[in-house]
Amino acid sequence: MEPLRRSPSPCPSSSPSTPPCEMFGHVGIAAVLDQLKIKAMKMGFEFNIMVVGQSGLGKSTMVNTLFKSKMWKTTVPGFVMPIPQTLQLHSVTHVIEEKGVKLKLTVTDTPGFGDQINNDRCWDPILGYINEQYERYLQEEILITRQRHIPDTRVHCCVYFVPPTGHCLRPLDIECLQRLCRTVNVVPVIARADSLTTEEREAFRRRIQQNMRVHGIDVYPQKSFDEDINDKILNSKIRDRIPFAVVGADREHLVNGRCVLGRQTKWGIIEVENMAHCEFPLLRDLLIRSHLQDLKDITHNVHYENYRVIRLNESHLLPRGPGWVNLAPASARQLTSPGPSKACRRARDSPEDGF
Protein backbone atom coordinates (compact mmCIF):
# COMPACT_ATOMS: atom_id res chain seq x y z
CA MET A 1 0.00 0.00 0.00
CA GLU A 2 1.45 3.29 -1.10
CA PRO A 3 1.78 6.04 1.47
CA LEU A 4 -0.50 9.01 1.06
CA ARG A 5 1.09 11.84 -0.79
CA ARG A 6 0.53 15.37 0.53
CA SER A 7 -0.82 17.74 -2.04
CA PRO A 8 1.42 20.67 -2.70
CA SER A 9 0.53 23.79 -0.71
CA PRO A 10 -0.79 26.65 -2.82
CA CYS A 11 1.40 29.00 -0.80
CA PRO A 12 5.17 28.91 -1.17
CA SER A 13 7.20 28.00 1.86
CA SER A 14 7.60 31.10 3.96
CA SER A 15 11.04 32.18 5.00
CA PRO A 16 11.82 33.86 8.33
CA SER A 17 11.77 37.24 6.57
CA THR A 18 8.30 36.80 5.06
CA PRO A 19 5.08 36.45 7.12
CA PRO A 20 3.06 33.22 6.78
CA CYS A 21 0.21 33.33 4.34
CA GLU A 22 -3.43 33.25 5.40
CA MET A 23 -5.03 29.90 4.56
CA PHE A 24 -8.57 31.03 5.32
CA GLY A 25 -10.62 34.10 4.68
CA HIS A 26 -13.32 35.78 6.75
CA VAL A 27 -14.30 33.73 9.82
CA GLY A 28 -17.11 35.87 11.24
CA ILE A 29 -15.88 36.64 14.73
CA ALA A 30 -17.32 40.14 14.42
CA ALA A 31 -20.80 38.58 14.45
CA VAL A 32 -20.39 37.98 18.19
CA LEU A 33 -21.34 41.62 18.72
CA ASP A 34 -24.57 41.08 16.83
CA GLN A 35 -25.32 37.98 18.93
CA LEU A 36 -24.76 39.92 22.15
CA LYS A 37 -26.99 42.71 20.91
CA ILE A 38 -29.82 40.33 19.99
CA LYS A 39 -29.58 38.57 23.36
CA ALA A 40 -29.53 41.87 25.25
CA MET A 41 -32.55 43.10 23.29
CA LYS A 42 -34.47 39.99 24.29
CA MET A 43 -33.57 40.16 27.97
CA GLY A 44 -33.83 43.92 28.38
CA PHE A 45 -31.98 46.02 30.92
CA GLU A 46 -32.47 46.89 34.58
CA PHE A 47 -31.57 50.19 36.19
CA ASN A 48 -32.33 51.24 39.75
CA ILE A 49 -31.97 54.85 40.82
CA MET A 50 -32.54 56.56 44.17
CA VAL A 51 -33.20 60.26 44.73
CA VAL A 52 -32.30 61.80 48.09
CA GLY A 53 -33.07 65.32 49.25
CA GLN A 54 -35.41 67.56 51.15
CA SER A 55 -39.03 67.97 50.16
CA GLY A 56 -39.71 70.64 47.58
CA LEU A 57 -36.43 70.36 45.66
CA GLY A 58 -38.06 68.87 42.55
CA LYS A 59 -36.93 65.25 42.86
CA SER A 60 -40.08 63.78 41.32
CA THR A 61 -40.12 66.35 38.54
CA MET A 62 -36.46 65.67 37.76
CA VAL A 63 -37.09 61.92 37.40
CA ASN A 64 -40.02 62.62 35.06
CA THR A 65 -37.78 64.93 33.03
CA LEU A 66 -34.92 62.41 32.82
CA PHE A 67 -37.01 59.62 31.34
CA LYS A 68 -39.70 61.81 29.70
CA SER A 69 -42.44 59.80 31.34
CA LYS A 70 -44.74 60.16 34.34
CA MET A 71 -42.75 58.09 36.81
CA TRP A 72 -44.09 60.12 39.72
CA LYS A 73 -47.28 62.12 40.09
CA THR A 74 -46.48 65.77 40.64
CA THR A 75 -48.47 67.77 43.16
CA VAL A 76 -51.15 70.18 42.06
CA PRO A 77 -50.08 73.85 42.34
CA GLY A 78 -51.51 75.41 45.46
CA PHE A 79 -52.11 72.04 47.15
CA VAL A 80 -49.75 71.48 50.09
CA MET A 81 -48.87 67.85 50.77
CA PRO A 82 -48.29 66.94 54.43
CA ILE A 83 -44.66 66.21 55.24
CA PRO A 84 -44.17 62.58 56.36
CA GLN A 85 -43.37 62.26 60.06
CA THR A 86 -40.88 59.47 59.39
CA LEU A 87 -38.62 58.69 56.47
CA GLN A 88 -40.53 56.10 54.45
CA LEU A 89 -38.87 55.02 51.24
CA HIS A 90 -41.17 54.42 48.32
CA SER A 91 -40.22 52.62 45.08
CA VAL A 92 -41.96 52.66 41.72
CA THR A 93 -41.08 50.34 38.82
CA HIS A 94 -41.90 50.97 35.16
CA VAL A 95 -40.82 49.37 31.90
CA ILE A 96 -39.74 51.98 29.36
CA GLU A 97 -39.29 50.98 25.72
CA GLU A 98 -37.44 53.02 23.12
CA LYS A 99 -36.60 51.74 19.62
CA GLY A 100 -37.10 48.15 20.71
CA VAL A 101 -34.89 48.45 23.80
CA LYS A 102 -36.71 47.72 27.06
CA LEU A 103 -35.50 49.24 30.30
CA LYS A 104 -36.94 48.11 33.63
CA LEU A 105 -36.55 51.27 35.68
CA THR A 106 -37.02 51.38 39.46
CA VAL A 107 -37.00 54.77 41.17
CA THR A 108 -36.80 55.01 44.97
CA ASP A 109 -37.82 58.28 46.59
CA THR A 110 -36.92 59.40 50.12
CA PRO A 111 -39.73 61.74 51.23
CA GLY A 112 -39.12 63.76 54.35
CA PHE A 113 -35.31 63.47 54.34
CA GLY A 114 -33.87 66.30 56.41
CA ASP A 115 -37.26 67.91 57.02
CA GLN A 116 -37.48 67.20 60.75
CA ILE A 117 -36.24 69.35 63.60
CA ASN A 118 -34.10 66.49 64.87
CA ASN A 119 -32.30 64.89 61.92
CA ASP A 120 -30.05 62.67 64.01
CA ARG A 121 -29.09 59.61 61.94
CA CYS A 122 -31.75 60.35 59.35
CA TRP A 123 -29.56 58.55 56.81
CA ASP A 124 -29.98 55.16 58.53
CA PRO A 125 -33.19 54.22 56.62
CA ILE A 126 -31.44 55.04 53.33
CA LEU A 127 -28.32 52.99 54.10
CA GLY A 128 -30.50 50.23 55.49
CA TYR A 129 -32.50 50.05 52.25
CA ILE A 130 -29.37 49.99 50.06
CA ASN A 131 -27.72 47.24 52.09
CA GLU A 132 -30.99 45.32 52.27
CA GLN A 133 -30.96 45.06 48.47
CA TYR A 134 -27.35 43.82 48.61
CA GLU A 135 -28.43 41.25 51.19
CA ARG A 136 -31.28 40.01 49.01
CA TYR A 137 -28.97 39.57 46.05
CA LEU A 138 -26.38 37.81 48.23
CA GLN A 139 -28.92 35.42 49.73
CA GLU A 140 -30.01 34.43 46.20
CA GLU A 141 -26.44 34.15 44.97
CA ILE A 142 -25.23 31.73 47.66
CA LEU A 143 -28.03 29.23 47.09
CA ILE A 144 -26.87 25.84 45.83
CA THR A 145 -29.75 25.78 43.35
CA ARG A 146 -30.30 29.36 42.29
CA GLN A 147 -32.21 31.17 39.61
CA ARG A 148 -30.70 31.54 36.18
CA HIS A 149 -31.28 35.28 36.33
CA ILE A 150 -31.16 36.77 39.83
CA PRO A 151 -33.52 39.76 40.13
CA ASP A 152 -31.34 42.84 40.55
CA THR A 153 -32.88 45.34 42.96
CA ARG A 154 -29.56 46.88 44.01
CA VAL A 155 -29.37 50.67 43.81
CA HIS A 156 -27.07 51.52 40.91
CA CYS A 157 -27.05 55.29 41.38
CA CYS A 158 -28.08 57.76 44.09
CA VAL A 159 -28.79 61.32 42.92
CA TYR A 160 -28.30 63.62 45.91
CA PHE A 161 -30.13 66.95 45.70
CA VAL A 162 -28.28 69.85 47.33
CA PRO A 163 -30.53 72.82 48.23
CA PRO A 164 -29.53 76.04 46.39
CA THR A 165 -28.36 77.96 49.45
CA GLY A 166 -25.43 79.52 47.59
CA HIS A 167 -23.05 79.07 50.55
CA CYS A 168 -21.62 75.56 50.99
CA LEU A 169 -22.61 72.04 51.99
CA ARG A 170 -24.58 71.82 55.23
CA PRO A 171 -23.28 69.57 58.03
CA LEU A 172 -26.22 67.23 57.33
CA ASP A 173 -25.19 66.95 53.66
CA ILE A 174 -21.58 66.24 54.61
CA GLU A 175 -22.49 63.53 57.12
CA CYS A 176 -24.88 61.84 54.71
CA LEU A 177 -22.60 62.03 51.66
CA GLN A 178 -19.66 60.60 53.60
CA ARG A 179 -21.68 57.50 54.37
CA LEU A 180 -23.46 57.16 51.04
CA CYS A 181 -20.36 57.36 48.86
CA ARG A 182 -18.93 54.24 50.58
CA THR A 183 -22.04 52.22 49.78
CA VAL A 184 -23.42 53.42 46.44
CA ASN A 185 -22.57 55.54 43.41
CA VAL A 186 -23.48 59.12 44.38
CA VAL A 187 -24.09 61.92 41.86
CA PRO A 188 -24.74 65.27 43.62
CA VAL A 189 -26.75 67.96 41.85
CA ILE A 190 -27.69 71.54 42.70
CA ALA A 191 -31.48 71.53 42.77
CA ARG A 192 -33.60 74.40 41.47
CA ALA A 193 -30.54 76.07 39.94
CA ASP A 194 -32.74 78.74 38.33
CA SER A 195 -32.91 80.44 41.74
CA LEU A 196 -29.21 81.33 41.43
CA THR A 197 -27.47 83.63 38.99
CA THR A 198 -24.73 82.26 36.76
CA GLU A 199 -22.00 83.76 38.97
CA GLU A 200 -23.63 82.50 42.19
CA ARG A 201 -24.06 79.05 40.67
CA GLU A 202 -20.40 78.76 39.68
CA ALA A 203 -19.15 80.01 43.05
CA PHE A 204 -21.50 77.60 44.83
CA ARG A 205 -20.17 74.71 42.74
CA ARG A 206 -16.55 75.52 43.63
CA ARG A 207 -17.37 75.69 47.34
CA ILE A 208 -19.10 72.31 47.18
CA GLN A 209 -16.14 70.78 45.35
CA GLN A 210 -13.81 72.14 48.02
CA ASN A 211 -16.04 70.75 50.79
CA MET A 212 -16.00 67.32 49.16
CA ARG A 213 -12.20 67.34 48.88
CA VAL A 214 -11.71 68.44 52.49
CA HIS A 215 -14.13 65.88 53.93
CA GLY A 216 -13.08 62.97 51.69
CA ILE A 217 -16.35 62.63 49.79
CA ASP A 218 -15.59 60.57 46.66
CA VAL A 219 -18.57 60.87 44.35
CA TYR A 220 -19.10 59.22 40.97
CA PRO A 221 -17.14 58.96 38.67
CA GLN A 222 -14.26 58.03 40.96
CA LYS A 223 -10.71 58.66 39.74
CA SER A 224 -9.53 55.22 40.88
CA PHE A 225 -11.90 53.48 38.45
CA ASP A 226 -10.77 55.17 35.22
CA GLU A 227 -9.71 52.27 33.02
CA ASP A 228 -7.99 53.97 30.07
CA ILE A 229 -6.94 57.39 28.82
CA ASN A 230 -10.26 58.04 27.08
CA ASP A 231 -12.22 57.36 30.27
CA LYS A 232 -9.83 59.56 32.21
CA ILE A 233 -10.31 62.50 29.83
CA LEU A 234 -14.10 62.17 29.76
CA ASN A 235 -14.48 61.64 33.50
CA SER A 236 -12.15 64.55 34.27
CA LYS A 237 -14.48 66.87 32.39
CA ILE A 238 -17.46 65.44 34.27
CA ARG A 239 -15.75 65.79 37.66
CA ASP A 240 -14.99 69.42 36.90
CA ARG A 241 -18.74 70.13 36.41
CA ILE A 242 -20.06 68.12 39.38
CA PRO A 243 -22.36 68.97 41.08
CA PHE A 244 -24.53 69.68 38.04
CA ALA A 245 -26.81 72.70 38.30
CA VAL A 246 -30.15 71.32 37.11
CA VAL A 247 -33.72 72.44 36.61
CA GLY A 248 -36.57 69.96 36.24
CA ALA A 249 -39.75 70.42 34.23
CA ASP A 250 -42.29 67.98 32.82
CA ARG A 251 -44.41 70.44 30.82
CA GLU A 252 -43.93 71.48 27.21
CA HIS A 253 -44.00 75.07 26.00
CA LEU A 254 -43.93 76.58 22.53
CA VAL A 255 -40.73 78.58 21.93
CA ASN A 256 -39.98 80.01 18.47
CA GLY A 257 -42.28 77.47 16.83
CA ARG A 258 -40.91 74.41 18.60
CA CYS A 259 -42.02 72.49 21.69
CA VAL A 260 -39.50 72.44 24.54
CA LEU A 261 -39.50 71.17 28.09
CA GLY A 262 -39.26 74.09 30.44
CA ARG A 263 -40.59 76.20 33.27
CA GLN A 264 -42.71 79.27 32.67
CA THR A 265 -41.73 82.39 34.62
CA LYS A 266 -42.73 86.01 34.25
CA TRP A 267 -39.29 86.69 32.75
CA GLY A 268 -39.54 83.95 30.16
CA ILE A 269 -39.22 80.17 29.77
CA ILE A 270 -36.34 78.22 31.28
CA GLU A 271 -35.49 75.41 28.86
CA VAL A 272 -34.19 72.39 30.73
CA GLU A 273 -32.44 70.95 27.66
CA ASN A 274 -30.66 74.22 26.86
CA MET A 275 -27.09 74.29 28.20
CA ALA A 276 -27.27 78.09 28.36
CA HIS A 277 -30.03 77.76 30.97
CA CYS A 278 -28.99 74.73 33.06
CA GLU A 279 -26.86 71.57 33.02
CA PHE A 280 -29.62 69.02 32.85
CA PRO A 281 -28.27 67.57 29.53
CA LEU A 282 -24.99 66.73 31.30
CA LEU A 283 -26.82 64.82 34.03
CA ARG A 284 -28.95 62.92 31.50
CA ASP A 285 -25.91 61.98 29.40
CA LEU A 286 -24.08 60.75 32.49
CA LEU A 287 -26.92 58.61 33.84
CA ILE A 288 -28.31 57.21 30.59
CA ARG A 289 -26.29 57.80 27.44
CA SER A 290 -22.67 57.29 28.48
CA HIS A 291 -22.31 55.75 31.98
CA LEU A 292 -25.40 53.63 32.65
CA GLN A 293 -23.58 50.31 32.20
CA ASP A 294 -20.55 51.59 34.07
CA LEU A 295 -22.77 52.50 37.03
CA LYS A 296 -24.08 48.93 37.08
CA ASP A 297 -20.58 47.45 36.77
CA ILE A 298 -19.16 49.49 39.65
CA THR A 299 -22.18 48.63 41.78
CA HIS A 300 -21.60 44.91 41.20
CA ASN A 301 -17.80 44.80 41.20
CA VAL A 302 -17.06 47.35 43.94
CA HIS A 303 -19.91 48.27 46.27
CA TYR A 304 -21.68 44.92 46.28
CA GLU A 305 -18.34 43.10 46.41
CA ASN A 306 -17.33 45.11 49.50
CA TYR A 307 -20.61 44.20 51.18
CA ARG A 308 -20.22 40.55 50.17
CA VAL A 309 -16.66 40.36 51.55
CA ILE A 310 -17.72 41.81 54.90
CA ARG A 311 -20.71 39.48 55.22
CA LEU A 312 -18.74 36.36 54.29
CA ASN A 313 -15.89 37.28 56.63
CA GLU A 314 -18.40 37.59 59.45
CA SER A 315 -19.81 34.14 58.69
CA HIS A 316 -18.06 30.78 59.05
CA LEU A 317 -17.21 28.69 56.01
CA LEU A 318 -18.27 25.13 56.71
CA PRO A 319 -16.52 22.13 55.07
CA ARG A 320 -19.73 20.67 53.70
CA GLY A 321 -18.77 20.82 50.06
CA PRO A 322 -17.55 23.23 47.43
CA GLY A 323 -19.07 26.65 47.74
CA TRP A 324 -21.17 25.86 50.81
CA VAL A 325 -21.69 28.94 53.01
CA ASN A 326 -23.70 29.16 56.22
CA LEU A 327 -24.71 32.83 56.16
CA ALA A 328 -26.84 34.14 58.99
CA PRO A 329 -29.33 36.96 58.24
CA ALA A 330 -27.93 40.48 58.56
CA SER A 331 -28.73 42.45 61.70
CA ALA A 332 -30.11 46.00 61.72
CA ARG A 333 -26.68 47.34 62.70
CA GLN A 334 -25.00 45.67 59.72
CA LEU A 335 -27.54 47.12 57.30
CA THR A 336 -27.07 50.70 58.48
CA SER A 337 -23.31 50.59 59.04
CA PRO A 338 -21.46 51.77 55.90
CA GLY A 339 -18.19 49.99 56.68
CA PRO A 340 -14.82 51.57 55.79
CA SER A 341 -13.78 51.01 52.21
CA LYS A 342 -10.13 50.45 53.17
CA ALA A 343 -11.08 47.55 55.39
CA CYS A 344 -13.09 46.07 52.55
CA ARG A 345 -10.13 46.22 50.19
CA ARG A 346 -7.83 44.81 52.87
CA ALA A 347 -10.21 41.92 53.52
CA ARG A 348 -10.58 41.22 49.82
CA ASP A 349 -6.82 41.29 49.12
CA SER A 350 -5.84 39.29 52.21
CA PRO A 351 -4.44 35.83 51.29
CA GLU A 352 -5.83 34.34 54.51
CA ASP A 353 -9.43 34.56 53.36
CA GLY A 354 -11.01 31.22 52.67
CA PHE A 355 -12.57 32.19 49.30
Image: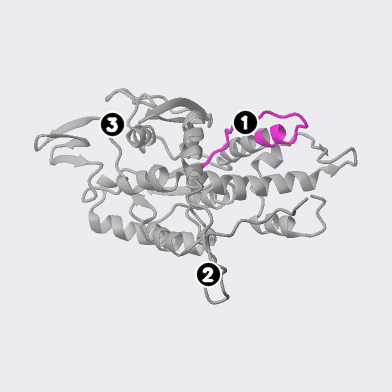
Residue 19 is marked as 2
Are there few (<14), some (14-19), or many (20+) residues within 10 Å of tag 1? few
Label 3 and label 1: CA atoms lie apart by: 35 Å
Callout 2–callout 1 Cβ contact below 8 Å: no
Please, what is the three-letter code of the amino acid marked with disc 3?
A: Asp
Q: Where does label 3 land, which residue? A: 250
98, 90: nearer the viewer: 98
Please, what is the three-letter code of the amino acid marked with disc 2?
A: Pro
Q: Earlier in the sequence, mark 2 or mark 3?
A: 2
Q: Position of residue 333 (x, y in %)?
A: 70, 40
Label 2 and label 3: CA atoms lie apart by: 62 Å
User: Is disc 1 placed on a helix, strand or loop?
Assistant: loop
**Callout in the foreground (2, 3):** 2
Q: Position of residue 150 (x, y in %)?
A: 63, 31
User: Is disc 3 placed on a helix, strand or loop?
Assistant: loop
* Residue 351 quadrant: bottom right
Q: Where does label 1 land, which residue? A: 149
Q: Horizontal placement of 207 versus 268: left or right?
A: right
Are there few (<14), some (14-19), or many (20+) residues within 10 Å of tag 3? many
Q: Position of residue 70 (x, y in %)?
A: 35, 25
Please, what is the three-letter code of the amino acid marked with disc 1?
A: His
